Amino acid sequence: MNERALRTAGVAGACALAVGAYAAARWARYGHVHPQRHPADPLLDRFLPDPEIDEYHRVRVRAPAAVTYAAARGMDPMASRLVALIFRLRALPATLHRRHEAGGAASWARGSRGLVDEAVSIGWGVLAEEPGREIVVGCYTQPWHQEVRFHALPPEDFAAFAEPGYVKIAWTVGAEPVSPGESVFVTRTRVAATDPEARRRFRRYWVPMSAGIVLIRYLNLSTVKREAERRAAQEVLAR
């Protein structure tokens, strides 16, 4: 084996070890969440106070909170080519079987109506909103299926919903004011299964899929920051 082949094999082996270590860590940490590590979110706590997954992401933005919130709520998820690629890869099994993945990745299109409106159009429901500050969106679903369908619930029924075989998912976008011209964009995602079998299925789904999902969250932070700061700069110039 020549030197180039040895280097390639070494890189491939290192990648395989890294992926294996990541998967093992995700598997071991599943269900061990500590929401108190992050700032309290009373609005989200009304709907999913005891999650099995609690992902929290934030970024500081040079824009007023109202501007940041508007940019986050109206964000086009497909503005990032990498995010669009991840969604297409998620939809690939259904595409190969010539089936439209109703309510899934294939439903999103470039130039969408905005994150929240698009989510609602494919089955999610708005659970609560503090105008100009935060919105909570949720559903119950079975994401491990090839054709993923999202089902909304009335806000008053979401916390108590316990029909076996599903997971409940709630996510937020919000903006916290730091000063008149600065804010923090926050997005948080929580998941809870309705029974042990759904928990086992979701855990098997989450371990390999979580890397792409978390990457999307980080890319969205940059997208919102860039758009909010652009809007804030335009407002300054217009004065």
Image (spheres, rainbow, N blue to C red):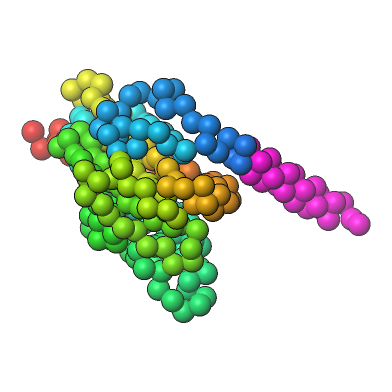
Per the picture, the main secondary structure of the magenta-coloured stretch is: helix
The quarter holding residue 133 reads top left
Compared to 153, does 59 lie above or below?
Answer: above
**Residue at the (26%, 52%) spot, across then down:** 153
Furthest-right residue in this view? 1
**Residue at the (51%, 47%) spot, across then down:** 196
Comparing 158 with 19, the one in front is: 158
**Residue at the (42%, 43%) spot, across then down:** 191
The x and y percentages for residue 208 are 58, 51
Furthest-top residue in this view? 179
Quarter of the image with the N terminus in it: bottom right
Compared to 41, does 138 lie above or below?
Answer: below
- The residue stretch that appears in magenta: 1-25
Q: Does 22 sit left or right of 136 as displayed?
A: right
Q: Does 12 sit left or right of 95 as displayed?
A: right
Furthest-left residue in this view? 239
The x and y percentages for residue 149 are 37, 62
Q: Does 124 sit left or right of 221 as displayed?
A: left
Question: Is residue 2 in the magenta section?
Answer: yes
The answer to whether any part of residue 11 appears in the image is no
The quarter holding residue 221 reads top left
Comparing 67 with 173, the one in front is: 173
The x and y percentages for residue 200 are 55, 49
**Residue at the (52%, 52%) spot, across then down:** 197
The answer to whether any part of residue 59 appears in the image is yes
Looking at the rendered structure, the number of numbered marks drawn on it comes to 0
